[in-house]
Amino acid sequence: MTYASEVTSMIRVRFAPSPTGNLHIGGSRTALFNWLYAQAKNGKFILRIEDTDKLRSKQEFVNEILDSLKWLGFNWDEIYYQSQRFALYKQFAQKLLDEGKAYTEKLPDKEGEAIIFKVTPQKIKLNDLIRGNIEFEAETIKNQVLIKSDGTPTYNFACVVDDATMNITHIIRGEDHISNTPKQILLYEALGFKVPEFAHLPLIMGTEGGRLSKRTGATAISDFRKIGYLSEALVNYLLLLSWSPGENREVIDINEAIKLFDVKDVNKTAAAFDLDKLNWINNQYLKKEPLEKLNSLIIPLLIENNYIQKDNFDKNYVISIIKLFQARLSTINDFLDWANFFFLKDIEIEEKAKEKLLSRDLSKEFKLFIERLGMLEKFDIETIETSFREMVKELGLETKTLIHPIRAALTGKTIGPGLFEVIYYLGKERVKERLEKWINKE
RNA sequence: GACCCCAUCGUCUAGUCUGGCCUAGGACAAGAGCUUUUCAAGCUCUCGACAGGGGUUCAAAUCCCCUUGGGGUCACCA
């Protein structure tokens, strides 16, 4: 059943980034909640590029923002550029001028005339969807510039004209805009526009409190992508900042989130960006990721880093190695560091591995093990393990006193997959080579 | 400084609207252990919070007030 109200008032939300920088965590969360609300309510998600500042706005940032939004999966229904709407802003400013609600002013150091809105003293009430009633006193607000001397509109004015003419029903934006809201409400009323609903989202803070900085997570979304985060994981993490699906759920599919989401349920409290939790969520997704998709992400990386040659590599081998690491990866790029010994000829042995595992002279044991390996008829993980354990028993040693040093000599690391898998996938020759190299080094 | 917003484990949160089921639940991190082989995967366990003070009430994490603390905004930037 459909109700008349649903037919006549479709929900329209917007995300309005300014192309003066990359899309960051904060902006993408605002975009997410807008997009999510549109999906949840069967409404429209509008993208508006706020490029009125000709000096600071850059096409490359527009491209970066659009790419990031697409990568995150936030597809928009309509897109507008404020730089193409200057005539419209002028027209509405002129209207306020004609009605005596604004005046012009020329500053000595400026070329043209600015158009300025007269703020009349009054109480301004805002009923925020998340925060409830907020009251402001207009006395604390100065007269507002609408059109600057250079003919470009100010943020608050362009924003109101656009939100009204684009029929935006719900303005969902960061808490930093709360104090812009009374100014904007005054403009809506002066222009005779219907005031939309407002929902002010809490801000995302850095790990140590305070603003997000480069160190604390203000990394561009495109960088998270490069580092090797999955978009689904990043979106899932963002979802958990200031909102919760309830029932102790952490990992949640976006389609399920759409069913559960409502702006009204968003928290009022600011959340700190926590890279550890993002990594954990990314790992959860990486573990479940189909191998095919993982391959398509990792193989190009391997080629790029000269681990393998573009048209000349054993795909099945690469896939086997990927499987070995899949459950442990926090990011795709971890694979590069963790699995390098399977692809590179010369491996560097970490200092930690030398100190902890290779400080004792084990050349006798290493030589014996090379010999045993050479005699193996079958070369599979099980046979390697059996033979190794027999040898260790004969030598009267504990398994771990030999397992870890050998792995360290083969991989250069103190941690990694199981020894027998490592030996199997490295192959007899390379195992022999690396163990001998270590023996001779001593 | 003025105005505005916010306040549950170190962090993200459930519970707050509609007081009792909360000696406050989950997750990340941390610590301990298990996995006849590491851990950065898995399993088990531990640590750990209602900012403080007043009210209201038979009863308050939940409602009200104050204090404190954190954050935001005060541009011819967006």
Image (tube, grey):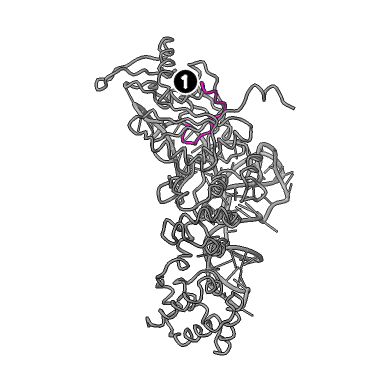
Left or right, A222 with reference to A243: left
Res A3 → quadrant: top right
Which residue sits furthest front?
A: A311
Counting from the top left corner in percent of width and height, residue A79 is at 49, 29
The secondary element bearing badge 1 is classed as helix
Tally of marks: 1
Magenta stretch?
Answer: A164-178
Q: Which residue is mark 1?
A: A187
Q: Between A358 and B76, which is closer to the camera in this rendering? A: A358
- Taking B6 as reference, is A110 left or right? left
Residue at 32% in and 22% down: A150
Q: Nearer the viewer, residue A263 or A234?
A: A234
Residue type at mark 1: give it: Leu
Give the quadrant of the C terminus of chain A.
bottom left
Membership of A166 in magenta stretch: yes
Q: Nearer the viewer, residue A346 or A168?
A: A346
Give the residue displayed 46% in from the left and 71% down from the top: A413
Q: Position of residue B69 (x, y in %)?
A: 45, 46
